[in-house]
């Protein structure tokens, strides 16, 4: 788990009616971003940043702590409490205690904390009656026993106590980032992208923060992400859209008769690479008018000196579309080469092209 440096500034944790707290938070965020571009405001008064990169750059953990402390004092005139530990939950505890937990010692640090740090008074009271006074003693309970006695939230806190989850529910303020964007005159209109499994972590938040900075500098099309769309060939279905674009409908919602079936290549090329297919007699392989190959592919040639032997092939899958305009004709063939590579090639306009690469 990544080591985080957490900075707690008590004066910025209480929002003032004149809006100065939010303005000071934005100024401090900009100042800390000069030291580390991945700094994050978790909620008012609490800032975190990954320590590994800044520690290498500035010459150690102590140097980073010292620089961050001076930056807070110079920017907002407040004394910061700073701590270091693995994961957001333990990093905040370390900041309040003003300790730097050594690498690999976060589990011991977490287990030694009183149950009050889990922010569940009923759970803490019940555990005390059972003779449990620390996070570690609560973590040692069997998950089945916790499920029998406590609520669903307590079961989640048990996972935090065991180190299976790295932050408390509600530890982050989900509205703060949007409020800071509006303060700067940048209003994110669309829902933020989520990670592959639909959850978010510190890495996702840092990636989003970096994407926002690049987008502010380069414009709405400065950051693009891949998205599936409708189409018959894999090279048609992959498209790039601006980061933060609203989600479209379900990909491939149309019937798309003649669509090339699974598996799809892991990589598709925006600009297909020309190549040559030859059979065992070193004759060019072409697709006939009836959609059949003139011979079995034996060699693929990318350039004059770059030749690969073909061990296996499947296809072709001919495709005729756009008869009302360009009357586009093409045929896909799957190849497995002697070095283990698997390719998707397509014949079009009397040439062969590399359309995709399988993982």
Image (cartoon, rainbow, N blue to C red):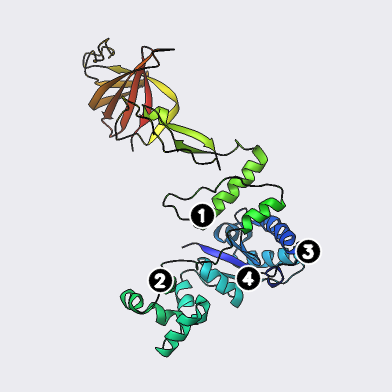
Closer to us: mark 4 or mark 1? 1
Q: Earlier in the sequence, mark 2 or mark 1?
A: 2
Q: Is residue 21 visible?
A: yes
Q: Could you give the CA–CA distance between mark 2 and mark 1, rounded to whole angstroms?
A: 27 Å
- Which residue bears the numbered disc 3? 18
Q: Could you give the CA–CA distance between mark 3 and mark 1, rounded to whole angstroms?
A: 33 Å
- Which residue bears the numbered disc 1? 203
Closer to us: mark 3 or mark 1? 3
Q: Could you give the CA–CA distance between mark 3 and mark 2, rounded to whole angstroms?
A: 39 Å
> Which residue appears farthest toward the top when viewing the image?
289
The one of 98 and 299 positioned closer to us in this rendering: 98
- The residue shown at (43%, 29%) is 269
Q: Position of residue 187 (x, y in %)?
A: 66, 47
- Which residue bears the numbered disc 4? 82
Closer to us: mark 2 or mark 1? 2
Q: Earlier in the sequence, mark 3 or mark 2?
A: 3
Q: Decide: few, some or many residues near mark 4? Use Cα within 10 Å; few <14, some 14-19, many ≥20.
A: many
Q: Earlier in the sequence, mark 4 or mark 1?
A: 4
Q: Is residue 39 left or right of residue 153?
A: right
- Which residue bears the numbered disc 2? 152
The one of 32 and 213 positioned closer to us in this rendering: 213
Q: Decide: few, some or many residues near mark 3? Use Cα within 10 Å; few <14, some 14-19, many ≥20.
A: few
Closer to us: mark 3 or mark 4? 3
Q: Decide: few, some or many residues near mark 1? Use Cα within 10 Å; few <14, some 14-19, many ≥20.
A: few
Tell me the SS state at disc 3.
loop
Cβ atoms under marks 3 and 4 closer than 8 Å: no
């Amino acid at each position: 788990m990544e080591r985080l440096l957490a900075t707690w500034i008590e004066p910025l944790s209480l929002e003032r009616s004149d809006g100065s707290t939010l303005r000071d938070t934005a100024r401090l965020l900009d100042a800390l971003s000069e030291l580390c571009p991945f700094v994050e405001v978790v909620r008012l008064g609490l800032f975190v940043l990954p320590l590994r990169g800044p520690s290498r750059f500035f010459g150690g953990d102590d140097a980073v702590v010292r620089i961050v402390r001076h930056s807070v004092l110079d920017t907002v005139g407040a004394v910061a409490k700073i701590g270091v530990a693995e994961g957001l939950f333990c990093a905040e505890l370390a900041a309040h205690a003003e300790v730097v937990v050594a690498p690999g010692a976060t589990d011991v640090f977490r287990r030694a904390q009183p149950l009050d740090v889990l922010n569940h008074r009923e759970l803490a009271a019940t555990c005390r009656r059972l003779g449990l006074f620390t996070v570690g003693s609560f973590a040692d309970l069997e998950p089945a026993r916790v499920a029998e006695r406590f609520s669903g939230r307590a079961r989640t806190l048990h996972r935090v106590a065991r180190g299976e989850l790295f932050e408390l529910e509600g530890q982050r303020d989900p509205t703060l980032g949007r409020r800071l964007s509006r303060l700067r005159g940048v209003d994110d209109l669309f829902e933020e992208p989520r990670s592959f499994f639909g959850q978010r972590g510190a890495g996702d938040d840092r990636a989003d923060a970096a994407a926002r900075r690049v987008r502010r500098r380069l414009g709405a099309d400065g950051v693009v992400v891949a998205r599936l769309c409708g189409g018959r060939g894999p090279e048609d279905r992959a498209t790039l859209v601006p980061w933060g674009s609203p989600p479209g409908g379900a990909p491939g919602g149309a019937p798309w008769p003649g669509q090339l079936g699974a598996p799809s290549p892991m990589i598709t090329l925006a600009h297909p690479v020309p190549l040559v297919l030859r059979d065992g007699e070193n004759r060019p392989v072409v697709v006939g008018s009836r959609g059949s190959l003139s011979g079995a592919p034996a060699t693929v040639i990318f350039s004059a000196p770059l030749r690969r032997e073909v061990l296996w092939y499947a296809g072709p899958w001919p495709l005729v579309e756009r008869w009302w305009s360009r009357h586009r004709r093409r045929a896909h063939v799957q190849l497995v080469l002697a070095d283990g590579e698997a390719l998707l090639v397509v014949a079009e306009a009397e040439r062969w092209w590399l359309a995709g690469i399988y993982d």
